[in-house]
Amino acid sequence: MQVNLNTQKNNRPNFGMAIHSNEVVNKALKARIKKPSELEKLNRIVNQQAKNDKIDINLMIMPDGKTLSANVYSIDKEDALSFAFFKNYSENAFTKLFQGPVGFIEKVAKIADKQAAKMRQFEADTYEDIFSKMK
């Protein structure tokens, strides 16, 4: 899984293979993350998602300049099942107040992990195995 924080200027990953960031998102996160424990938690999430090779997360900032949004989508565009997966999530008032930006990123990362597990399970069940059950 990758988290991609998209800007118009820069579309390079800043966090790692799985989580992509840009200057605008990084600036907003720096302004909102106040505790070292939150930064450590974000680091753990980023490291965990770097291992997700099925799903990407693209983090963005909404026009208000503070609210996070995330696109969660599959990496492998050759796989018809994978290509079909795309969801968008945005912070809401509850998330902003009680979970903060790291909580939101954690929530999106869990969604990406669940989708990646489903994709791995589908790959484990080959077409032949599935079709043989229908005979």
Image (cartoon, rainbow, N blue to C red):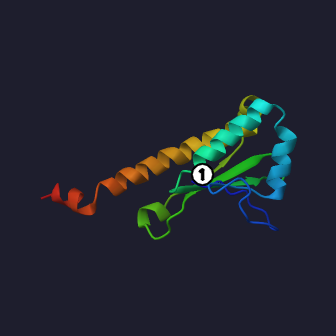
Other-residue count near label 1 (Cα within 10 Å), few / some / many at <14 / 14–19 / ≥20: some
Q: Which residue is mark 1?
A: 50
Relative to 107, say whether 127 is above or below. Answer: below
Q: Residue at x 81, y 45 (%)?
A: 29
Q: Quadrant of the C terminus?
A: bottom left
Residue at x-position 42% and y-position 62%: 81
Farthest-out residue, bottom: 78
**What x and y, as percent, mark residue 63?**
83, 54
Residue 17 picture quarter: bottom right
In the rendered image, residue 43, in percent from the top left (x then y), is placed at 69, 41
Image side of residue 72 versus residue 35, left or right: left
Pinpoint residue 23: horizontal percent, then vertical percent: 83, 57
In this image, 59 relative to 120: left or right? right
| Residue at 73%, 64% in the rendered image | 12
Residue nearest the viewer, comparing 44 with 83: 44
Where residue 79 sits, quadrant-wise, is: bottom left
Q: Quadrant of residue 123?
A: bottom left
Q: Is residue 66 visible?
A: no
Q: Residue furthest left?
A: 135
